[in-house]
Image (cartoon, grey):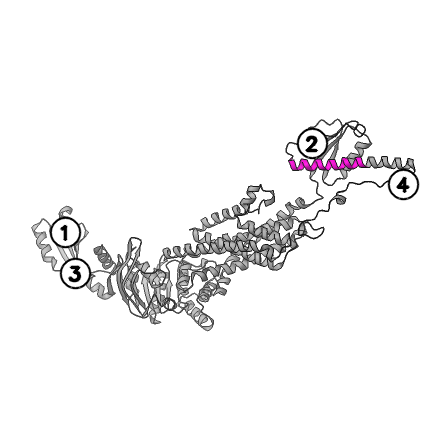
Amino acid sequence: MIRIEKLCKNYAQKKALDNLYLSISGSSIFGLLGPNGAGKTTLISILNGLTPFDSGEVLVFGMPLSSHLLEIRRRCSLIPQSLAFYDNLSVIENLNFFAGVQKIKGLEKQKNINYAIEINRLGDMLKQKAGTLSGGQKRRLNIAIGLLNNPDILFFDEPTVGIDPQSRNEILATIQAFKEDNKAVIYTSHYMPEIEKICDQVAIINAGKIIKQGDISSMLATDGQQISIELYETDAALLKACCSAFPVLSISGPTTLTLPAESEALLGELLALFTSKPIKIKQINYATTNLESVFINLTSTEK
Amino acid sequence: MFKSMLIKEFLLVSRDKHALAALFIMPCIFILIMSLALKDVFNEQKSMLSLAIIDAANNSSSEQLISELQDNSVIESQLLAIDNNDNITQIGSQFLLTIPAEYGDNSDVVLQAMIASDVTQNILLLFKAQISQIVMQQKLTDLNKQQIAIAKKMGESEPEAITFSQDDIINAQYANLGENQKPTSTQQSVPSWIVFGLFFVIIPMSTIFISERKQNTLMRLSAMNITISALFAGKIIPYLVINQIQVWLMIAVGMFVVPHFGADALTIGGSLPALFILSFSLSLAAIGLSILIATSVDSIEQATTIGGIINILLGAIGGIMVPKFVMPEFMQELANISPMSWGLEGYLDIFLRQGNVADVQNEVFALSTFGLSALLIATVIFKIKLRKVA
């Protein structure tokens, strides 16, 4: 559905996207993760034709973005993080306006509005001014507006910011329902449990590059496995000096070290070093971590 | 698409009490107040001079002079006792006229006038002209009486009385107005406040526009294939309509409301097509400036402050608050930089000078060029800002 190759975008002296490759297939919920300033927003802006790119190739629905922008936009929808609607208009007036400006008319308009209302459970508040809705209801209206053109791809930019857990779960359920309606969702968020809960696939972006892409379970199986080494009380300076020889080793606490599972081969070397120094090992464990740890490990290693 | 934008803008403006007050209520109240406040400025029968009189002569000539002064509609006079020792400030009149003893009997005796220090040169000249006219008429009447006496003695027919009436000397006619037509305070103030009111679209337009920008609604609309030109057109068309409603509402106030409060009714002297074209070009200038401000500033607070200041400055310079004809020459030259001045001149051409399309074509061209230039600059600024947001 989306294929990106060698995508570059520079802002003045800063590289926002650096030779980025990404491939997203249809009817899935795809999580785009990355620290602030990693390039997520730039990528979403480019995919929606709001920001031009410097070089590379972007294909959406098999069509080059630069030459088929209008057609691509008609089949996509951006749901921005901010509540992009009119507080002084009612829910139904907002829906009518955004459908009208997209030239959606007649039966199609009515059908799409009804779908947006139904899936976002806005039926009881159609005549209520948008500004008077609760935080969760506003978020749902924000999503409903994005459904008016019956898009094949929905871009969600942190859609659950600033709302209570109950509303968040409702919104996540709504987004999961899109998959059943054969829509693709590109989802950016800082809430890792959300990503783990709803996404089939994720890509981790850092410093303008995709550093990891795949389905969550296999990512956890490879990058989520780690070896935890617990020590007896040790001189901090000595521990730091010993660990400096192993860049993949991270000091998680005063007496705890973690090593990625794929670096298991280093374990023997490490134990030999510790034995030669006054560093005593209490225990060694294999553990499976969550997406957040994987994300932190990958992005901090890249830095 | 434009229908949706039109409905949206109308709904937003109609639900914004401040916008309604600024666009419709404030200009109408201004028209009412200013028409009433300036009612007497255009009234030729209104007393413009206040005069206190001390009659030290107390003879037929002085009595006749006092009678003439009291009958004069331009002068409001009061007769003081001969022993009144109050100074002119205490009396509260602009002039204190003393008719000396032997006035009329001795030709060397002349009237004595004390003038209040705040009397301007214009008022002083008017006072002198009025007194001279009355005294001259008095002398002519005396002369006529003498001629009649001589004619009677000679057995000849009585000569005709020589009267010194302004109507016999000069027929004053306002340019481009019908016979006996004169400008009224309503004709003067309605154009001013139409122009001022139209430029008040700056406040609601920029407020809505900045909210849309800040909340990323404009970005969302861009992602929905709405081009910048369509976005701007979606603003321009509704506000052109809103501005025309303002114009006709204010004209209606001038025609039907103001007369109920004692001022003259507004009459549309010039051509209706000229009024339509001028109103549209003025609206384009106001909307262009509004969008330029809305795209240039970063917050609603900035827009309302800067928009308000620009509006008042353009109004002050452009002859809205103070008529241009009372300004010194350099200020009148300066007024020409204000689009409000162009609009005002156009409306005065239509309302006061019975102008047609050809009479307002320069103003229409200047206003349209100003509006389109502002829109062009706003487009460039908006494109830059949209990319920054994206």
Q: Secondary structure at mark 3?
A: helix
How far apart marks 4 and 1 lie (CA) works out to 139 Å
Q: Amino acid at mark 1?
A: Cys
Residue topped by disc 2: B91
**Host chain of mark 2:** B
Quick one: label 3, few (<14), some, or many (20+) residues within 10 Å? many
Which numbered disc, 2 or 4, marks the residue closer to the eye? 4
**Host chain of mark 3:** A
Quick one: label 2, few (<14), some, or many (20+) residues within 10 Å? some
Q: Are marks 3 and 1 on the same chain?
A: yes
Q: Secondary structure at mark 2?
A: helix
Give, as a single range, the part of the protein colored magenta: B117-140
Residue topped by disc 3: A261
Question: Residue A270, percent across and down?
Answer: 11, 55
Q: Are marks 4 and 1 in contact (CB under 8 Å)?
A: no
How far apart marks 3 and 4 lie (CA) works out to 140 Å
Tell me which numbered mark, 3 or 1, is placed earlier along the sequence. Answer: 1
Which numbered disc, 2 or 1, marks the residue closer to the eye? 2
Quarter-of-image position of residue A76:
bottom left
Residue A244 magenta-drawn?
A: no
The mark found on residue B157 in the picture is 4
Residue B120 magenta-drawn?
A: yes
Question: Residue A87, percent across and down?
Answer: 45, 58
Q: Name the residue: 53% across, 44% down.
A: B334
Quick one: label 1, few (<14), some, or many (20+) residues within 10 Å? some
Q: Amino acid at mark 3?
A: Ala
Question: Is B282 or A77 nearer to us in this picture?
Answer: B282
The mark found on residue B16 in the picture is none
Q: Secondary structure at mark 4?
A: loop
Q: Are marks 3 and 4 on the same chain?
A: no
Residue topped by disc 1: A243
How far apart marks 3 and 2 lie (CA) works out to 107 Å
